[in-house]
Amino acid sequence: MSVPGGPRPTLEAVAALAGVSRATVSRVVNGGTGVRTEIREKVRRAVDELGYVPNSAARSLVTRRTGAVAVIIAEPETRVFSDPFFAQQLRGIGRELAAADTQLLLLMVESDRDHERIGRYLAGGHVDGALMFSLHRADPLPAMAGASGLPTVFGGRPDWTDTTGRAGAGPLYVDTDNRDGARQAVRHLLSRGRRRIAVITGPLDQTSAQDRLDGYREALDGPDAPAADERLVADGGFTAEGGEQAMAALLDAVPDLDAVFACSDLMATGALRTLRARGRRVPQDVAVVGYDDLAPAAWADPPLTTVRQDVEGMGRIMARLLLRRLAAPGIPLSPVITPAELVVRESG
Amino acid sequence: MSVPGGPRPTLEAVAALAGVSRATVSRVVNGGTGVRTEIREKVRRAVDELGYVPNSAARSLVTRRTGAVAVIIAEPETRVFSDPFFAQQLRGIGRELAAADTQLLLLMVESDRDHERIGRYLAGGHVDGALMFSLHRADPLPAMAGASGLPTVFGGRPDWTDTTGRAGAGPLYVDTDNRDGARQAVRHLLSRGRRRIAVITGPLDQTSAQDRLDGYREALDGPDAPAADERLVADGGFTAEGGEQAMAALLDAVPDLDAVFACSDLMATGALRTLRARGRRVPQDVAVVGYDDLAPAAWADPPLTTVRQDVEGMGRIMARLLLRRLAAPGIPLSPVITPAELVVRESG
DNA sequence: GGAGGAGATGAGAGCGCTCTCAAATGAAGT
DNA sequence: ACTTCATTTGAGAGCGCTCTCATCTCCTCC
């Protein structure tokens, strides 16, 4: 091994020690095909002896590849780390990338200044591609990625009109059928005889939140359905605290509501807290349905009826799409929509 | 702007467009000192027109700097994302690094295969330095970082004997005074008249867990203290579920225990659940003290008496130490130990 | 008016690697 | 023995950038 902190050995040094050319060492280091066994072994020994590690900057300067992809979450750490949704998604992504020996770089975006820094980072060629999720409508990141030509896959349908004007070159994304999931949730509540069904939405500048709200409205639009009532809609911002507050606001506005569809499990747990504090029994007085089917749903008291989406699977698919695009930039790829499935438990 | 996905413009192209040399463009891009205003503006316009972004691989090939540091958490995503400790620490680190315009790369280590991949990544010169935490005793990562000469700061005292043999070149780390914090917690319980004080430890292959256990034992070692009892010690693995199970085991072994010191708030909330399930009142029957003073402590029912450590601050200090080391590799830096402080609430 | 010096600019080497292409080697076929 | 062809190896260009050093310009001062 070389002296720590000392100058790191280069290909040249290995070549000299092994008595071969740079090219041969390069071949051995990168797979070793087409090199005689004897020489290959000699080079391997030299590599070990010097503790040689290829300089990634030099390598990616010529290959134009870095072997890393960025995962960008457009939320502050606080949310990223408190919402199991991200953990689950990231686990799927991580698994898939690790299998392809690709490094995952997690970048969180908090302030506007961060946007700029991250835009620079992406454009600077530090990564081969990007996975972005939790994007809000006005987010400049997709445009930045688009402009720099960085292959990108989105988690959730981006609210983004293609500015390049190229036909058929829409963004690549993975999403669940949010509209259908919401419809299933609300229909379920209707089928159980609930008539005054409130909804706690996510931030409406995210398509997933808007789509779920649309699904809620659609389900309520049938001939035998109760009349729509805007007082039954509240924004819970996809957080537990938001759900808590939204539930309180809903109860204040419509004290006799008999059901609530929370557009995420986290918000549902918040709603549950408020309902308990206000002495409403779940599901007897108020039925509650969540969305996601992550850990909080099963642990909640009572366990939540919710809409399952395969979050880890979505992460895997995102990673797979990106890897496929990187491997073969030419071939066209389509967005993937995974199905949503109602899971009935005790809350409604 | 150039065509997305097309060949990216180089310094050369900008120089040609602006009618100057590569060197001048380089100067403008990197601060612009020593360039006449007129020329500087001309170059800036050319940069904008072409949408030029420096190629980071080429740059770091010559500067030997990447402008990024890795944060390595030796835990699976599941833990990283469910433990607010990491979120808080990461927030401190993120703030400090962003202020220095340094990119944060989060790497999680799950399997042994990951170790190897991450070792390669670190040695490959992708980052200027590393911040590692939650290391377990046998972790090979510190040695890898040491061997490659990568400047590293540890979160928590590493259990690592310096293999280089250089005197005074111990690892740089940031920690709280775990021993003292634990002592304070246990003394507090003693002062409230508790006599059979159990402890729920973290994984004992982490120094923070071992140090807290040592502190617990020290506090119990006084002349007027109750006799030590190994049945009062259980490992909760620093997770809520672990705390739940450890508490159950402790109650089974010593049904008349009257206090428990959980070495993290998360484990304390788990213990609280078990105590409630077993019908013990907190603090009347069993007093509970946690450690960390993170969000779960204040939210718990009843709110937790706990030992505060400034987690975000520790993150900041870690980042600051690393940045200082990077800026001036020569000057010696010392580990930092931050104080622990008892916060008395209602649980004990 | 010319020497001296400060400041601005350009030429060119070189960072460590990959990859093309040509040369060398050796096996096989005629 | 000679050609043919596959296989292995090496020479060298070049990726895009920074940085040193030499050159050039333009003041300032005697």
Image (cartoon, coloured by chain):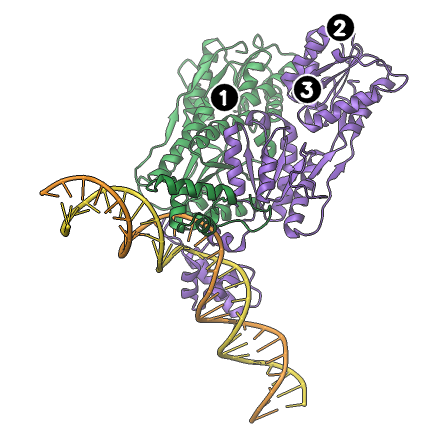
Chain colours: A purple, B green, C yellow, D orange
Mark 3 vs mark 2: tell me if same chain: yes
Q: Secondary structure at mark 3?
A: helix
Q: Is residue B24 left or right of residue B89?
A: left
Rendered view: A327 above or below A159: below
**Residue B316 coordinates in the image, percent (x, y):** 43, 28
Question: Chain letter of disc 1?
Answer: B
**Residue A161 coordinates in the image, percent (x, y):** 68, 35
Mark 1 burial class by Cα count in 10 Å: few <14, some 14-19, many 20+? many
Amino acid type indicated by mark 2 = Pro
Which mark lies nearer to you, 2 or 1?
2
Residue most toward the right?
A: A224
Whole-number angstrom distance, CA of label 2 to CA of label 1: 40 Å
Residue sitting nearer the eye, A319 or B160: A319
Amino acid type indicated by mark 3 = Met
Amino acid type indicated by mark 1 = Asp
Q: Mark number for residue A255? A: 2
Question: Chain letter of disc 2?
Answer: A
**CB atoms of marks 2 and 1 within 8 Å:** no
- What residue sits 36% from the left and 35% below the top? B324
Residue to which mark 3 is pinned: A267
Q: Secondary structure at mark 2?
A: loop
Q: Is residue A309 left or right of residue C22?
A: right
Residue to which mark 1 is pinned: B292
